[in-house]
Amino acid sequence: MRFETSQHLKMGQSMRLAPRMIQSMEILQMSLAELEERIQQELESNPTLELVEGAPDAERPPADTSPDDSRPLSLSGEASAEEFERLDSYEQSNPDAVENEYAQDMTRSEAPEATYEPYEGPRHSSGDDRDAKAEAIAAAPAKGQSLADHLRGQWALVDVEAGLRPLGELIIAHLEDDGYLRTPLEDLIPKANLTPPPAVEQLRRALHAAQLLLEPAGVAARDARECLLLQLDALEDSGDFGWPATTFVNARRLVESHLEDIGQNRLPRIAEKTGLSLDDIKEALSLLRRLSLAPARRLVDDDVKPITPDAIVEYDETQDRYIAYLNDSRLPNVRINQEYAKLAKDRGADRRDREFLKTNLSNAQWLLDAVGQRRHTLLRVVREVVEAQREFFDFGPQALRPLPMTGVAEKLGIHVATVSRAVADKFIATPRGVLPLRKFFSGGVSTTGGAGDKGEMAWDAIKASLQEVIAAEDRTHPFSDEQLVDELKKRGIEIARRTVAKYRDQLNIQPARLRKAF
């Protein structure tokens, strides 16, 4: 066997996206809050970019740049290895033909400043001097306490035996986010780091103390049954209730022995096993509905980010049409500093200073172009949605029509992946509420109206019709999935039973046997 090495020449052609294009796609995909943060970061790091207080976009003077600087490309002509590594990772995680997308979209030369004059709605500006960054920091909510922090604070103030205090802290440290202790007490012994190690009985006493002294009632329960019983005891001890003592007795009996039957809505079976009347069982259930299966969640604020709509749709009564505009008045109003732009051309200045300014001017110009391209693309997509979904805005969710992204992309002359990125994580404020922009893009089915007229209905519209049918049903005789198929067919909607079951699950609607009222 002989090994040889040789060299060969091979010609080939390939397309790679410039890192600037990758960043442009990222700008397009950003929500309004993310874009605001991105611009703030550039303001802090780029001295050639300046904040203009109160000046609308249309009044921003153009950047005084040379022809070479007018394009959003790096003046050095070379991209760093880090940028191309980021490009590779982005291509791997976004396999939707990104090469074709931007090769097509960018060659169309859609210059935002030259091709549209959007109605942008009222712009709120203030003549007062203010620091936008300082205001944003001041308005940011304080970081909330964790469940363990809340409970440790309570535990430090309760009166317990000295030997139980470290064991209570150990138990608190092993509570899950919903407040349950699912770790067996035996497994906590080696984690106590005490000499001698605690006995299981000591841990039981510490757990019992924590369940009695910590609030809300039900914290540190080991299962749902124990959680409900702890809450029943606390509610009965408080005396703040409107049920007779027999109701507490019945409720405790149901929790202890018939919790599974309650979950399956088997009230007749419970009545048969316990000898209680249906009225007594329903009264006990009304008491249990005041309780929570995860009461500890009340102590922790949900980390829910506020939704800021990227666009607003309003109804114009005078012209009987819906008007869409971008909600970008909260974005920092920025422009290129003209003094720095002139200094970058001054050959009398230090060469290193001029190179530094040219690089930053290029970055600033690219950011302005990318934001302008984002605004242009997003506004076109939103306007197309408003035009296609007029019936939704007039009549509600049941009038939502199928709107595939491919159709919008073809009509706007852009790649479908561009449409996908434009609607990603975006919300619009409409007369029907604040809704995700992606909600308006879905497939659907053909429908037949009462007079035999044919039309199309989106999947979300079918879900709305399904919700309406179930809301109007007789709870003592709820519709089965087969009956729901028949009811929808009466409305001209023909879908399979398994589709009804799938949509019912997505809407968090229980099956008929669990919706039945006795």
Image (spheres, helix red, strand yellow):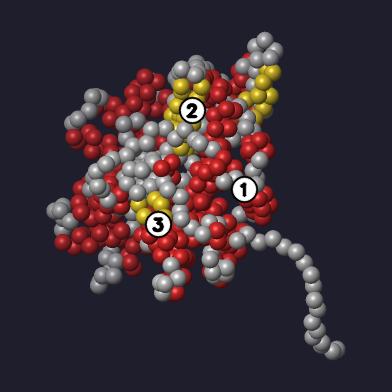
- Tell me the kind of residue under disc 1: Ser
- Residue at horizontal 39%, vertical 50%? 334
* Front label number (1 vs 2): 1
* Residue on which the image places disc 2: 323
Residue 451, percent across and down? 67, 10
Identify the element where label 1 is drawn: loop
Q: Is residue 435 left or right of residue 240?
A: right
Q: Is residue 15 left or right of residue 277?
A: right
Closer to the N terminus: mark 2 or mark 3?
2
Whether residue 506 is visible, yes or no, is no
* Residue on which the image places disc 3: 338
Q: Is residue 350 left or right of residue 28?
A: left
Q: CA distance from mark 1 to mark 3?
A: 26 Å
Q: CA distance from mark 2 to mark 3?
A: 36 Å
Q: Which class describes the residues within 10 Å of circle 2: few (<14), some (14-19), or many (20+)?
A: some
* Residue on which the image places disc 1: 109
Work out which quarter of the rendered image holds the N terminus and state it: bottom right
Residue 144, percent across and down? 28, 50
Identify the element where label 2 is drawn: strand
Closer to the N terminus: mark 1 or mark 2?
1
Q: Answer yes or no: do the residues labelled 1 and 2 have beta carbons within 8 Å? A: no
Identify the element where label 3 is drawn: helix
Work out which quarter of the rendered image holds the C terminus and state it: top left
Above or below, 365 relative to 262: below
- Residue at horizontal 42%, vertical 48%? 61
**Which disc is residue 390 wearing?**
none
Q: Which class describes the residues within 10 Å of circle 1: few (<14), some (14-19), or many (20+)?
A: few
Residue 116, percent across and down? 54, 38
* Image quarter of residue 250: top left
- Tell me the kind of residue under disc 3: Gln
